[in-house]
Image: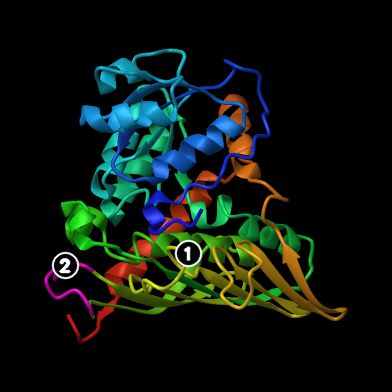
Amino acid sequence: MAVSEGANYAPAAMPKPVVEPGEFVFAAMHLDHGHIGGMTQGLLGAGGTLKWVYDPQPERAAAFKEQFPEVTIASSEEEVLSDPEVHLVAAAAVPVDRAPLGIRVMEAGKDYFTDKTPLISLEQLAEAKAAVARTGKKYMVYYSERIHVEAAVLATQLIQKGAIGKVLQITGMGPHRMGDPSSRPDWFFERARYGGILTDIGSHNFEQMLTFTGSDDAEILSSSIGNFGNPEHPELDDFGDAHVALSSGATGFVRVDWFTPSGLRTWGDGRTFVVGTEGYLELRKYVDVTTDNGPNQVILVDSEGEHRLEADGKVGYPFFGELVLDVLHRTENAMTQEHAFKAVELALKAQEAAKELTGR
């Protein structure tokens, strides 16, 4: 079934348990963004046991319980954080609240798994880094456009196997559909609470740049933001882009926007292009408007020819099982802490340096 807005995008569960029931216990709280559903599905598919849910708005917790009937609704955040059985807390709070919540979670002795963007300022980043160092706990991030999209999972595997040689350039396009603005919460339009378009949805793309190029750092060469279609919401960035030089020697470009037309069958035509010395890849993640083949199409062109690879339902989402085992074994196979923080650091720096285009 097509999903009209990205906030409600949650891939179907693809179970691949890595633990026995009760071996990895987690909770969900602060359900401000619909991504909490996908985060929960991923952890359950890896064999996790969902024990608690908490939200300050009881109706949201009740709706969550309808989707996941095994969960118990907690009466307070403290009831969750004081439970010694809970290994990890998954949350999708308002972006400005994600870092303070994560620090509370880690100081309570739990690992933290937050929706992207994981925080919205360089000051919050410094505080989160300090809390990780102080507590020894994880501050992991749901960069869903790579870890929960099979086309991106397959592309990661192909690149790591050398299918296109050394990566030279990556272009990521992340258009989203806003839908009815009146259906969006107030914080969606307040830059001090959502962080700006490059910080928010752009963080997905910076994470993919680092992953696909094998880089551990990057320099923002240029960036821009604008408001071209929503003058009644002057703090909303409905467009953003950035040009990046990565430490591997590759370059990257990202474009994100809120201009997906109503005629598209899904919430956004997310596409990624990766150019290497021996070939190139194109990812058609959520839809391929040129065919009826469905989502998760990977186009590979190499010395042997042209290949269309269908990833949908075939490669799964290994991140979640790796994260569960990382929590239990204190390893870093799903994603290193340095990588999780570097992706948002680049997004923050791009947002901070962005030229504001006319049209606002």
Task: Give the residue number, with chain letter if any, for mark 2.
Answer: 235
Magenta stretch: give its range: 229-236
Q: Is residue 12 left or right of residue 154?
A: left
Q: Is residue 51 magenta?
A: no
- Say what secondary structure mark 2 lies in: loop
Residue 82 drawn at (x, y percent): 34, 14
The correct choice, above or below, for 351 with respect to 156 in the image is: below
Q: Is residue 192 left or right of residue 150?
A: left
- Say what secondary structure mark 1 lies in: helix
Task: Give the residue number, with chain letter if any, for mark 1.
Answer: 206
Q: CA distance from mark 2 to mark 1?
A: 22 Å
Residue 114 drawn at (x, y percent): 40, 41
Q: Residues within 10 Å of mark 2 (few under 14, many from 20)?
A: some
Q: Is residue 102 left or right of residue 141?
A: left
Residue 64 versus residue 40: which sits nearer the camera? 64
Q: At 63% from the left edge and 40% from the top edge, which residue is drawn?
A: 14
Residue 115 versus residue 137: which sits nearer the camera? 115
Which residue is at the far bottom? 358
**Which amino acid, by three-letter code, is at mark 2?**
Glu
Q: At 59% from the left edge and 71% from the top edge, which residue is drawn?
A: 288
